[in-house]
Image (cartoon, rainbow, N blue to C red):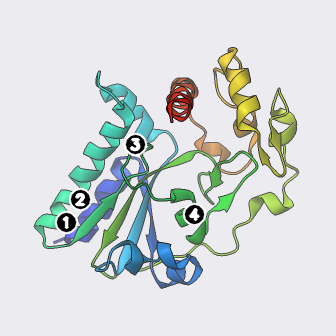
């Protein structure tokens, strides 16, 4: 008979999700305020949940509801359904989400980089398997000791010829980083509606590229989110 944790990991893959287990190796690299015990006093392990490839987003588009923040709500429902059996089995689990409107959002990119993921000129982090074709969905802080499989020495951009830089039609991508304002101006004018050309050119995890409906959804939703943030800043 499978344990609650074995069932959890089996269901995880079926939802198009992956987990990076955080443990002592993560704590050794993380700043003090992001170590497991700092995030939750009971935490003995963490699981950084991410959607790798298109499966999670395709499921979302099939089941999308007419509601505010539909992807965030779909994510929350999916993660809570995963976590509930663990809690029924007696596990203590604290769930944190990367949603922009969370009251006390965590710096998920800083957590991911302490876990071994790599930054890129695109402003996106890179995963060894999925490259830029992944997104952070949640952080679980748990009272169980889980086996950590740390990512060490993953620095794909260090030896890459950087096809992402010339691929950008408005030169918004450079080795030193991404010019968000130039990028969004281009997209607001209708550019790159079928996906970021620089992201599409990245050789890391190319087999997990999102299909066109997913690319179009995220290009449109990214512009909508940028507009919300811009309006909130102007009202501050």
Asked which quadrant contains residue 19, the reply is bottom left
Q: CA distance from mark 3 to mark 2?
A: 22 Å
Q: Is residue 51 left or right of residue 170?
A: left
Residue 211 in percent (x, y) is at 56, 30
The residue singled out by tag 1 in the image is: 86
Asked which secondary structure carries label 3, the reply is: loop
Residue density around tag 4, few if under 14, some if 14–19, many if 20 or more, within 10 Å? some
Spot occupied by residue 127 in the image (x, y as percentages of width and height): 61, 57
Disc 4 from disc 1: Cα separation? 27 Å
Up-down relation of residue 92 to residue 57 (above or below) = below
Q: Residues within 10 Å of mark 2 (few under 14, many from 20)?
A: some
- Label 2 element class: helix
Q: Within the image, what quadrant is residue 190 found in?
A: top right
In this rendering, the label closer to the viewer, 4 or 1:
4
Q: CA distance from mark 1 to mark 2?
A: 5 Å
Q: Is residue 131 positioned above or below 30 on the image?
A: above
Q: Which residue is mark 3?
A: 101
Describe residue 169's horizontal placement relative to residue 232 as left or right: right
Q: Earlier in the sequence, mark 4 or mark 1?
A: 1
**Relative vertical location of residue 2 with respect to residue 191 in this rendering, above or below:** below
Residue under pointer 2: 83
In the rendered image, which quarter is residue 160 located in?
Answer: bottom right
**Which residue is nearer to you in this view: 148 or 120?**
120
Give the labeled residue for mark 4: 110
Of marks 3 and 1, the one in the foreground: 3
Dot 4 or dot 3, earlier in sequence: 3
């Amino acid at each position: 008979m499978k344990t609650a944790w074995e069932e959890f990991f089996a269901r995880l893959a079926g939802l198009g999700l992956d987990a990076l287990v955080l443990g002592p190796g993560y704590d050794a690299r993380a700043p003090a305020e992001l170590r497991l015990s700092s995030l939750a006093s009971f935490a003995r392990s963490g699981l950084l949940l991410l959607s790798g490839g298109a499966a999670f987003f395709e499921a979302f588009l099939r089941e999308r509801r007419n509601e505010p923040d539909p992807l965030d709500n779909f994510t929350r429902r999916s993660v809570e359904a995963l976590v509930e059996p663990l809690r029924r089995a007696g596990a203590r689990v604290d769930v944190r989400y990367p949603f922009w409107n969370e009251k006390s959002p965590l710096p998920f990119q800083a957590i991911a980089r302490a876990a071994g993921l790599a930054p890129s000129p695109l402003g996106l982090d890179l995963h060894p398997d999925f490259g830029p074709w992944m997104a952070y969905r949640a952080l679980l802080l748990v009272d169980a000791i889980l086996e950590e499989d740390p990512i060490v020495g993953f620095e794909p951009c260090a030896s890459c010829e950087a096809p992402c830089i010339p691929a950008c039609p408005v030169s918004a991508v450079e080795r030193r980083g991404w010019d968000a304002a130039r990028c969004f101006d281009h997209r607001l004018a209708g550019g790159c509606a079928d996906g970021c050309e620089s992201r599409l050119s990245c050789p890391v995890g190319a087999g997990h590229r999102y299909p066109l409906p997913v690319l179009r959804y995220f290009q449109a939703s990214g512009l909508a989110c940028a507009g919300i943030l811009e309006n909130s800043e102007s009202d501050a």
